[in-house]
Amino acid sequence: MLNDLVPALLNIEEAGFGHYRDEWQQHDFCFGRNLGVNRGAEYLRGRGAGVSAQGAYHIETPEGVLVVSGGEISIRWQEGRVDDGRT
């Protein structure tokens, strides 16, 4: 596994995360799951919606899409899973 991981990580700097985005999306365990995002005093709930080409995680909330790209963020599983339509 490390033999595959190290070259890929080194290539991200050159090719960018967008090069790996589609493969990431195929294995995204959070996609379609109900999530809670803790950002300091703010706690938001939504559903995992994948990553951008820059590697920021998207979470669908009632207020719109929350883009999570850094900071002190933890994802806490919530009950339930939505069918994400992936095979």
Image (cartoon, rainbow, N blue to C red):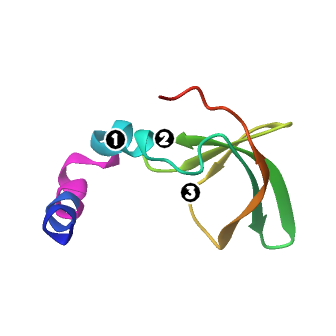
Task: Please name the residue that numbered disc 1 is placed on.
Answer: 23
Q: Cα distance, mark 2 to mark 1?
A: 12 Å
Please give the name of the residue rendered at 33% of the width and 48% of the height, measured from the top-left corner.
Answer: 17
Q: Are marks 3 and 2 in contact (CB under 8 Å)?
A: no
Q: Which one is closest to the eye, mark 3 or mark 1?
A: 1
Mark 1 lies on a secondary structure that is: helix
Task: Assign the N terminus to one quadrant of the image.
Answer: bottom left
Q: Cα distance, mark 3 to mark 1?
A: 19 Å
Please give the name of the residue rendered at 83% of the width and 55% of the height, measured from the top-left corner.
Answer: 44
Position of 60 relative to 29 (above/below): above
**Which corner quadrant of the image does residue 68 belong to?**
bottom right
Q: Name the chief secondary structure element in magenta.
A: helix
Mark closest to the chain's N terminus, 3 or 1: 1
Task: Please name the residue that numbered disc 2 is placed on.
Answer: 52
Q: Three-letter amino acid code at disc 1?
A: Glu
Task: Please name the residue that numbered disc 3 is placed on.
Answer: 69
Q: What stretch is highlighted in magenta?
A: 9-17
Q: Three-letter amino acid code at disc 3?
A: Ser
Residue 19 falls left or right of residue 56: left
**Which corner quadrant of the image does residue 19 belong to?**
top left
Q: Which one is closest to the eye, mark 2 or mark 1?
A: 1
Mark closest to the chain's N terminus, 2 or 1: 1
Position of 58 relative to 86 (above/below): below
